[in-house]
Image (cartoon, rainbow, N blue to C red):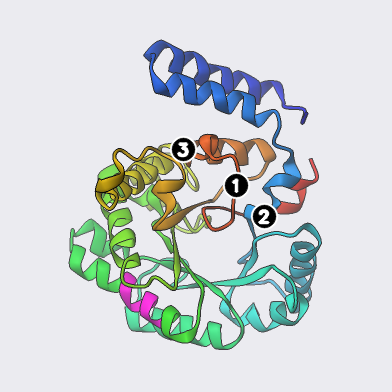
Amino acid sequence: MTELSPRFIDELLKRVYAAADSLGDKADQTLVWLLYVGSVKPHHLAPLIDHTNLMPTATKADIEKLSREAGEYNFASVCVLPPAVPYAVPVLSGSSVAVCTVVGFPLGATYASVKAYEARAAIEAGAQEVDMVINHALLKQHEISALRDDIATVADAVSSSGGKVLKVILDAAYHTPEQVAVATQQVLDVSLAYPAVRFFTKTSTGMELDKILVSKYSGPQKGAREEDLRTIVGVHSHFANEHHDDEGHVSQGLYSLEFAGIKASGGIRTYEDALFMLYAMGARLDPCLQSKDYRLGTSAGVSIVKK
């Protein structure tokens, strides 16, 4: 059994007691999770990790090292800036590790056609996965049709170029829970038109470039937040229910991820951070964690799996 820190155990027990007070299914799910985390070893998380280096100063040597680490630990992917894709591809050729890149990064404040061009160019260079940043102003202004088009334009580029995965970055810390829910709904709606592409709703870029915005909308905490993930999971579950009327009620878990996965990114530095994110993603009732359902974006992948 993996040794857990006192801080982690204290936080987990708080959740158990709170759930028990509420009675019902939530308490049962939390107690199942308490038993589950004791059997999940750090290396079991490796297939969920997008091993990340998005620093603008990252050199070819840095990206090659990142890629070798990803191959050694069997991470889901490496996530690098578009010009670094050609550095990662030959290192990971023949492996199960995907090459992922970002478009419209990190602000999302550019034309959808520009993001689409970036996606096509990266896929032509060998990337299989694309993480796009939404146009935040469109969400703030409640221009929902335009926001959906922003996502769909990139999705079309990924699909037509042979890309396999599109992760849509909400940067939830910039937005209210209601806005996060609306944006998540657009990701799911667009996903229906592109069955060959696996979609993910992703919490954030993990970059702290705009502390004024983050402070204004969310206070000092940024990156992956459990409350944002719970909002995202709720929308996924509702969407799954709507598309499975003949199957009855569909609770949090695999069915809610049929149409799109969920990726937590930003501030995940330890094994225990990763467990809390998975808890918030509803993974506690999923006996077999898979990279098509859950992803963890982090630059600390090696230290997490070597705990």
Is 5 rendered above or below residue 124? above
Tell me, for residue 139, which label it has, or none: none
Label 2 sits on a secondary structure element that is helix
Between circles 1 and 2, the one closer to the viewer is 1
Q: Are marks 3 and 2 in contact (CB under 8 Å)?
A: no
Q: Residue at x 50, y 46 (%)?
A: 224
- For the C terminus, give its image quadrant: top right
Report the side of 39 relative to 185 (left or right). right
Report the side of 88 relative to 117 (left or right). right
Front one among 113 and 110 = 113
- Kindly report the distance in space between the C-alpha atoms of the residues bearing marks 3 and 2: 21 Å
Mark 1: few/some/many CA within 10 Å (<14, 14-19, 20+)? some
Q: Residue at x 25, y 49 (%)?
A: 242
The residue stretch that appears in magenta: 151-157
Q: Are marks 1 and 2 in contact (CB under 8 Å)?
A: yes
Counting from the top left corner in percent of width and height, residue 95 is at 74, 72
Front one among 56 and 176 = 176
Label 3 sits on a secondary structure element that is helix
Q: Main secondary structure of the magenta part?
A: helix
- Kindly report the distance in space between the C-alpha atoms of the residues bearing marks 3 and 1: 18 Å
Marked residue nearer the N-terminal end (1 or 2) = 2
Amino acid residing under circle 3: Glu
Amino acid residing under circle 1: Leu
- For the N terminus, give its image quadrant: top right
Q: Which residue is mark 2?
A: 47
Tell me, for residue 289, which label it has, or none: 1
Mark 3: few/some/many CA within 10 Å (<14, 14-19, 20+)? some
